[in-house]
Amino acid sequence: MNNSDIERSRAFDDKINNLGRITSIISLALMVSVPLVITIFNKIQVSAGEIMASASGLIAMFAPMAIVENISYYPIIGAGGVYLSCITGNIMNMKLPSALSGMKLAGVEPGSSEGDIISIICVGVSSFVTVTILMLSMFIIGKYITPYLSQPILQPAFANIMPSLLGALVTPFVIKSVKVSVVPFALSIALCFALGGGYVQRYQSYFLPLIMVASVFAAYCMYKRGMLALKPAQGAPK
Amino acid sequence: MNYLEVANSNLMFFMCTLVIAFVLLQAVLFIKAAWKRGAEMGIEPAVMKKAMTNAGLFSVIPSLPIVVMLVVLTVNLGQYFPWLRLSVVGSATYENMAADIVAKASGLAGIADPRFDLQIFTMAMWVMSIGIIWGIVFNIFFMKSLDKFSKKAKASNSHFIPVLSGALFIGMLALMSAPYITDTKNTTAIVSFISAAVAVILCGKVAKASGVKAIDEFSLPISLIVGMASAIVYTNTF
């Protein structure tokens, strides 16, 4: 990478961060404006104290989770991917898998500059699709397809989206990097047996940094000992 | 005044549409910026298009349970607000939980309680809106610094970076998968996980053998459906 490349890449990072910040501020203001406008326009009496009392439990639960999750997602889908996916949510079951599979398809590594580009595209498209489907559902198809979607025979399918998704997602990566996978899988499985899978799932956000750090540490040790076959670092300055 | 009159009012529709329109605009702006930078970096437009199609197709399936939740929430919260909430940050579980907390705090049995009125509805709107915005708040204040800091670290450690991001997301996927693969009480989840894993491997093999690349390109949506379908078959046979 020569100087002008570095400059361009920096300019793009700045652009994404500025775009991310500005659009996040506007989205946030708009989201809060919905209850605000409704409250004022309909002259509804609500007490801020009572709202905070109900919200505080949720905030205490979701604020630390959000911080841990965003820091964990960042190395995988990049700043742009995180800005976008935080606005539309459904990160674990939709945004992250679309981005990962997009990167696999494009043959680029998560965390590389190319990976970040593909992530933004995939997360953006994924947001678009969900919003469009919900829009159509609200206006037209919701009434018609819900009876079909809530058929008892389909329930096991919807109840098992996550394990299916994970099986499809995890396998190619594990096959590609068996050595790196050993420690995080062994640890996660041990945690589930020791504490129960339900408990691990409930506090997933708090176990996440632990497993990620352990996984990186193990990979680092293997890397230092030359146990990992090195491919040329994609996207990194050459 | 019945709260559903407010919930289904034109003003509510207008406010919700405003937010959703902005969210879509944000996705477009990000995709455009990424596409431009991707082309500049020499990523083939065909590759970016493939990633887009894959992300779009894949996202349809995990969106379907959200449609069902939309219809469920609509019964008690009116047509538009659930549409907004499920299109932005919220997840189905969160919205239900948040609304329920407010209803219970007001001494009701839940959101389906006939005493659910305009005041409680408005409070629920507030709580649902502010309970889960913390990922966005984090991004506004800290994402730029995190990005700058890690880009610097990357520049000085270019060879270890692909290993690092690999270890990070394998760690994340391992922690998410473990509760499903260790849950011996819910064997359906294990069956789905394994079926999807086998399907994704087969997709790769079949694509290579037949030369039909599309099978590999759409291996994620295909395997997801295989995993979900096997859950239906398994539950109905055993």
Image: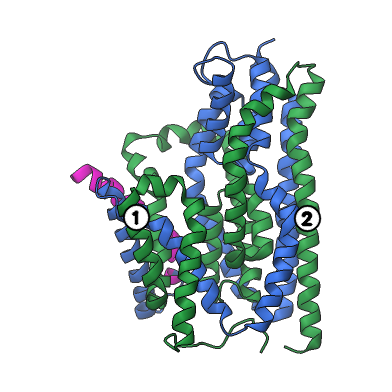
Chain colours: A green, B blue
Q: In the image, is B43 to the left or to the right of B223?
A: right
Tell me: residue A45, above or below residue B29.
above
Q: Position of residue B122 (x, y in %)?
A: 68, 22
Outermost residue, left direction?
B238
Residue type at mark 1: give it.
Gly
Residue underneath mark 2: A21
**Residue B148 covered by magenta stretch:** no
Which chain's residue wears label 1? B
Tell me: residue A227, above or below residue B31.
below
Residue underneath mark 1: B227
- Magenta residues span B215-238
- Nearer to us of marks 1 and 2 is 2
Q: Nearer the viewer, residue B211 or B89?
A: B89
* Residue A174 falls in image quadrant: bottom left
Q: Position of residue A44 (x, y in %)?
A: 76, 16
Q: Nearer the viewer, residue A189 or A171?
A: A189
Quadrant (top left, top right, bottom left, bottom right) of the N terminus of chain B: top right
Residue type at mark 2: give it.
Arg
Quadrant (top left, top right, bottom left, bottom right) of the C terminus of chain B: top left
Residue, x 49% and y 64% (percent of image)? A212
